[in-house]
Image (spheres, coloured by chain):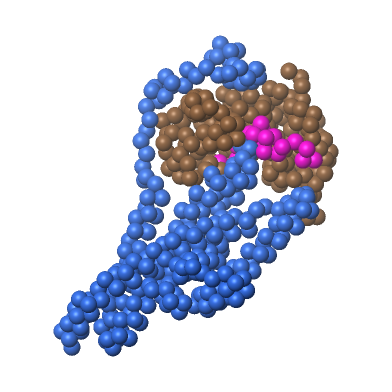
Chain colours: A brown, B blue
C-alpha cells in the first residue's frame, strides 16, 4: 500500500526564460487522492502535463515504479496508457461515438479482446451514468456529459494513476456536481488520483492529500485536515481565506 | 440563327456522337483516377510534413525529417508553380530524353502528370487540414497511450478528410476541366475531340457549344455528388437513446482474465464491496 507509484524529483520546467516549475519534489502512493490547489498561473496544470509527458520537463526526474520516464528508456506511449488523463476541455474524439471513444484505446493500445473491451467500456460508462448515450457523438452532448464520457474513456484503459486537469473548470455550476460525483465514486473505489482543481470542497472532503502551489513551487502539502484547518505557511493561509 | 445552330449540332452528333462520348469517358476516367492518386500523394506529403520533431529526438531522426520536409516543399513549389500543359510536355519528352524509357501508353503519362499536379495542391490542403484540428485531439489520443501513427490514423486523418472534402471536390472539378490541356501530348479527351472534329468539318462554334454543355454537365454532376458525400460524412444528426437496463444486463458478465491489481474495479474485492 505504501509503495510510491510516482516519484517526482527536482522537476523544473521553463518556457523560454519563464520558469514555470521550480524544483518540484513529491510522491504519489497507491490509493492516494491528491488535490493540487493554487491560483491560476502557479504551475499546477504544467506539473500535470509534465507528469503525462505532454510537456517535456527542462530538468529533473519522474519515476514510475522507480523507472525514469523522462530519459526516454521506457516506452512513452506505454507509460501514458498507464497514467490516464482527463482534460479541462474534454478532448473527446469528435469522429467517434461515445462508445467508440471508450473502445479505441483498448483495441489499439491495450489490444484487448473485443468482448472484454466492450464489457469494460459499458461498465465504466454505466458508472458515470452515460450508458443511454453510447451512440451519441461528442458534439451532441452537454459539457458535463462530455466530461463524464472522458472519465469513462480514461478508466476503461485501467490506468494505475488518473490525472485530472481542472476537470470542472469549463462547466457551469449545475454540471460540476455530476462530474464531481463521478470522481468521488472513483476515489471511494480506491483509484489513485491526482487532481488539479479549484473545487475546494472536493479537495477538503474527498482527497487524502492536499498540495498547495504558488509561483511554481510547492508551498505546503499535507492531509486536508491539516492544510485546510491549520495552514502553516502565510501564503497558504491567504489563499485559503479567499475560499473558506 | 438558333435553329441553324441546333441543326448543325444535330448533324455533328449524328456523325460524331460516339467520338464525343468517348472523349467524355476518357476525360472522366482521367479526372477521377488522377484526383484519387493525387489525394493519396497529398495525404502522404501532408502527413510527412506534420511529423512532430522534438529537440530531444536523435540527430538522425531530425536530419531525415528535415530532408523530407525540404523535398516535399520543392515538389509542391515546382508543380504548383508551373503550368500543367508544360509539365505534360516536360515529362512526356523529358523521361525518354533522360532515361531512354518511352511510355507505352498515353494514359500512363497523362495520369502521372495530372496526379502529381493534383498531389502538389492536395499536399497543402492536407497540411492545412491537419493543422486545423484542435491540438486537444492529439493530446487526448496521446494521453490514452496512442503512438503518433495511431493518433493520425484513427483520430486526426478521419477528421481532416471530412474538413478537406470541399477542397477535394474543388480539385476534382478543376481536373475535369484542366485535363483538356492533355491534348498537347495527344491524349484524346473531350477537348481533343473538339479540335479533331471541328478541324475536319469546319464547324467550330456548334462543336464548341457542345463542349461547353458537356463540361458543364460533368462539373454540375460532380458538385451534386460531392454535396451528397459531404452530407454522408457529416453523419446522423440525431441519436437513439439506449435502454440502460439492457446494457447493464450484459455488463459484468464477461469473465476477465485475472489482472491482480487491487485497484482493478473488476477484482473480487471491489465486486463484494459493491
**Horizontal side, residue A166 vs residue A100: left or right:** right
**Horizontal side, residue B191 vs residue A116: left or right:** left
Give the magenta part as a residue range.
A70-90
Residue for point 38% across, 23% down: B246
Q: Is residue B204 above or below residue B29?
A: below
Percent position of residue B86, x then y: 53, 78
Percent position of residue B153, x then y: 55, 46
**Residue B41 image-quadrant placement:** bottom right
Q: Nearest the camera: B104 or B1? A: B104
Residue A82 colored magenta? yes
Answer yes or no: is residue A103 visible: yes
Quarter of the image with the N terminus of chain A is top right
Q: Nearest the camera: A185 or A215? A: A185
Q: Please, which residue is most extreme toward the left here?
A: B3
Quarter of the image with the C terminus of chain A is top right
Residue for point 38% across, 72% down: B189
Residue A132 colored magenta? no
**Horizontal side, residue A81 vs residue A152: left or right:** right
Q: Is residue A199 above or below residue B95?
A: above
Percent position of residue A91, x then y: 56, 43
Q: Is residue A99 above or below residue A184?
A: below
Residue for point 64% across, 29% down: A159
Residue for point 75% across, 45% down: A56
Count of marks overlaid on the render: 0
Q: Nearest the camera: A25 or B213? A: B213
**Residue B42 image-quadrant placement:** bottom right
Percent position of residue B164, x then y: 48, 58
Q: Is residue B267 above or below residue B219?
A: above
Answer yes or no: is residue A204 visible: no
Amino acid at each position: 500500500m505504501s509503495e510510491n507509484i510516482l516519484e517526482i524529483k527536482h522537476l523544473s520546467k521553463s518556457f523560454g526564460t519563464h520558469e514555470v516549475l521550480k524544483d518540484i519534489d513529491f510522491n504519489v502512493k497507491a490509493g492516494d487522492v491528491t488535490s493540487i490547489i493554487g491560483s491560476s498561473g502557479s504551475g499546477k496544470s504544467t506539473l500535470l502535463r509534465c507528469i503525462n509527458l505532454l510537456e517535456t520537463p527542462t530538468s529533473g526526474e519522474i519515476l514510475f515504479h522507480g523507472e525514469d520516464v523522462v530519459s526516454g528508456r521506457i516506452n512513452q506511449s506505454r507509460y501514458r496508457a498507464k497514467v490516464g488523463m482527463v482534460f479541462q476541455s474534454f478532448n473527446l474524439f469528435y469522429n467517434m461515438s461515445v462508445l467508440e471513444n471508450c473502445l479505441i484505446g483498448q483495441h489499439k493500445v491495450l489490444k484487448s479482446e473485443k468482448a472484454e473491451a466492450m464489457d469494460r467500456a459499458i461498465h465504466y460508462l454505466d458508472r458515470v451514468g452515460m450508458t443511454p448515450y453510447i451512440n451519441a457523438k461528442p458534439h451532441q452532448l452537454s459539457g458535463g456529459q462530455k466530461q463524464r464520457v472522458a472519465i469513462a474513456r480514461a478508466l476503461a484503459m485501467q490506468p494505475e494513476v488518473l490525472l485530472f486537469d481542472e476537470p470542472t473548470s469549463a462547466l457551469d455550476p449545475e454540471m460540476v456536481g455530476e462530474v464531481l460525483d463521478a470522481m468521488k465514486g472513483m476515489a471511494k473505489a480506491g483509484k489513485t488520483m491526482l487532481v488539479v482543481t479549484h473545487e475546494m470542497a472536493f479537495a477538503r472532503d474527498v482527497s487524502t492529500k492536499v498540495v498547495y502551489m504558488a509561483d511554481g513551487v510547492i508551498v505546503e502539502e499535507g492531509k486536508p485536515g491539516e492544510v485546510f484547518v491549520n495552514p502553516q505557511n502565510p501564503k497558504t493561509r491567504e489563499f485559503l481565506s479567499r475560499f473558506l | 440563327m438558333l435553329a441553324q445552330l441546333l441543326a448543325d449540332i444535330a448533324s455533328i452528333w449524328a456523325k460524331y456522337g460516339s467520338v464525343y462520348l468517348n472523349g467524355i469517358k476518357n476525360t472522366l476516367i482521367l479526372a477521377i483516377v488522377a484526383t484519387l492518386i493525387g489525394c493519396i500523394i497529398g495525404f502522404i506529403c501532408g502527413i510527412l510534413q506534420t511529423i512532430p520533431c522534438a529537440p530531444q529526438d536523435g540527430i538522425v531522426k531530425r536530419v531525415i525529417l528535415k530532408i523530407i520536409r525540404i523535398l516535399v516543399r520543392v515538389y509542391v513549389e515546382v508543380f504548383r508553380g508551373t503550368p500543367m500543359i508544360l509539365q505534360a510536355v516536360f515529362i512526356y519528352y523529358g523521361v525518354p530524353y533522360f532515361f531512354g524509357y518511352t511510355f507505352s501508353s498515353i494514359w500512363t503519362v497523362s495520369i502521372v502528370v495530372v496526379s502529381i499536379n493534383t498531389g502538389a495542391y492536395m499536399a497543402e490542403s492536407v497540411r492545412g487540414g491537419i493543422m486545423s484540428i484542435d491540438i486537444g485531439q492529439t493530446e487526448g489520443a496521446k494521453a490514452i497511450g496512442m503512438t503518433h501513427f495511431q493518433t493520425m490514423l484513427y483520430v486526426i486523418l478521419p477528421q481532416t478528410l471530412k474538413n478537406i472534402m470541399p477542397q477535394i471536390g474543388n480539385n476534382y472539378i478543376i481536373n475535369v476541366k484542366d485535363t483538356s490541356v492533355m491534348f498537347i501530348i495527344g491524349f484524346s479527351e473531350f477537348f481533343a475531340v473538339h479540335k479533331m472534329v471541328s478541324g475536319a468539318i469546319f464547324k467550330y462554334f456548334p462543336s464548341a457549344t457542345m463542349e461547353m454543355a458537356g463540361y458543364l454537365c460533368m462539373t454540375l454532376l460532380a458538385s451534386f455528388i460531392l454535396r451528397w458525400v459531404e452530407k454522408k460524412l457529416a453523419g446522423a444528426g440525431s441519436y437513439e437513446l439506449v435502454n440502460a437496463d439492457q446494457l447493464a444486463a450484459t455488463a459484468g458478465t464477461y469473465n476477465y482474465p485475472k489482472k491482480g491489481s487491487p485497484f482493478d474495479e473488476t477484482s473480487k474485492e471491489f465486486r463484494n464491496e459493491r
